[in-house]
Image (cartoon, rainbow, N blue to C red):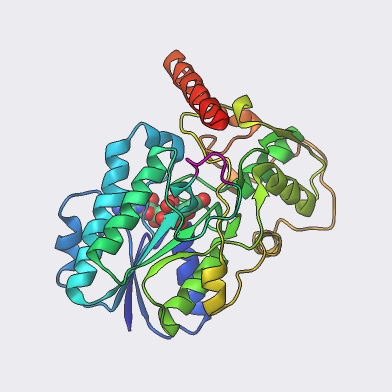
Amino acid sequence: MRVLLLGANGQLGSDLRRAHEASGARFDLVPIGRDTLDVAVPGDVDRVLKDRDFDALVNCTSYHKTDEVELNGGLAMAVNAHAVDALARICAAKGARFVHFSSDYVFGGDVLHRRPYREDDPTSPVNVYGASKALGETFAQLACPNAIVVRVASLFGVNGASGKGGNFVETIIRVAREKGRLKVVDDQVMSPTATADVAEMVLRMLTQGCPGGVYHVVGSGSASWYAFAREIVRLVNIPADVEACESRDFPTVAMRPAYSVLDGSKISSRFGAMPRWEDALERYLHAKGHRSGTREPAGCRAPDNEAFALRYDLMTTDQVPARTMSEWLLETEFDKYVRTRRRM
Ligand SMILES: NC(=O)c1ccc[n+]([C@@H]2O[C@H](COP(=O)([O-])OP(=O)(O)OC[C@H]3O[C@@H](n4cnc5c(N)ncnc54)[C@H](OP(=O)(O)O)[C@@H]3O)[C@@H](O)[C@H]2O)c1
């Protein structure tokens, strides 16, 4: 079996390659980077892939800097929706399996929803990124009926998201070490997920056979970003204060779902349960060398190789970007919208 892997150098793509190696490389995995195929360029998918032979194509490409995407809808639609359509079409034409990754951010518009989302719950994105991913899911399934759409969430992997400049775990560790205190939102609840665990599950889905459809592949359990941050700081043993706050304390350009926990029972009934996120986090911290028995003094600097971009789009005290007046007005409109929905 020959499998093409797009987005091979990203956070998830690199863990897929690692898991493939670790499992004995039982099939031929061909990594394809942006230098070979830029999916945002119209026609590039067909030009690069039409003469290649493959049995499956795994698409890890995405444009997912949530706030930036809000102001760049065209590029988001090109990468997250139209390119997915082109990839699904070429897979269908070749009789190849198409595996595509989507997001918990296809949900959130139903502000009263408070139970883990199932695969067949209606999508209701609250931002442009989520809308572009929801459209990508639809295109994938329309063009390639046996496509596998894997919804993941709140990823952390040893390479960090190339599109976001790191991941939440590294950001929290750095800010906690540098500042000794941080505020993190407690009113957004999600499913923290290790890319290493997603990679293992996807290899099982590919090699053991899996019917087409949507699957939720996320860490078991759930947490608010605040609870997640507290566990990171506790496990790394950083003497920092982690304070809970509300999303309204750190308004962002794009709205986030207040609740986007995904129900993983469909995948677990077929291939076994995904590990709990706390367990995955501990393994991740060991893999990155963050777990040690000694306490570090507050304010000590993160190692140079962990100089993650401050533009990372999750909210911690030192990461609120400078805002324009029109952004503030827009957020006020969003607040009004959410308050109205809550009264409904
Ligand atoms: N990260 C999260 O928290 C999260 C949450 C929910 C869902 N997801 C989904 O999970 C999947 C994997 O995410 P990830 O964290 O692994 O992201 P990532 O590290 O940013 O990887 C994305 C990959 O897409 C490639 N890419 C972006 N634009 C491209 C283009 N125009 N042409 C070709 N390649 C392009 C990037 O290439 P370069 O390396 O050259 O930039 C990178 O390899 C995505 O579908 C994402 O939407 C992620």
| Magenta part of the chain | 108-113
Residue 239 falls left or right of residue 88: right
Quick check: can you spot residue 35?
no
Image quadrant in which you'd find residue 70: top left
Residue 13 image point, x, y percent:
43, 63
Residue 47 image point, x, y percent:
14, 61
Foreground: 209 or 342?
342
Residue 41 image point, x, y percent:
20, 49
Image height check: is 219 above or below 77?
below
Residue 204 image point, x, y percent:
48, 79
Q: Is residue 110 magenta?
A: yes
Image quadrant in which you'd find residue 184: top right
Give me the residue at 43% from left, 48% from top: 106
Give me the residue at 27% from left, 69% from top: 145
The quadrant the N terminus occupies is bottom left
Foreground: 213 or 81?
213
Quick check: can you spot residue 9?
yes
Give me the residue at 52% from left, 70% from top: 266
Foreground: 226 or 28?
226
Most distant residue in the right direction:
294
Image height check: is 187 above or below 54?
above
Most distant residue in the front direction:
344
Q: Is residue 224 magenta?
A: no
Secondary structure mostly seen in magenta is: loop
Most distant residue in the top direction:
325
Residue 99 falls left or right of residue 248: left
Image height check: is 338 above or below 36?
above
Foreground: 133 or 172?
133
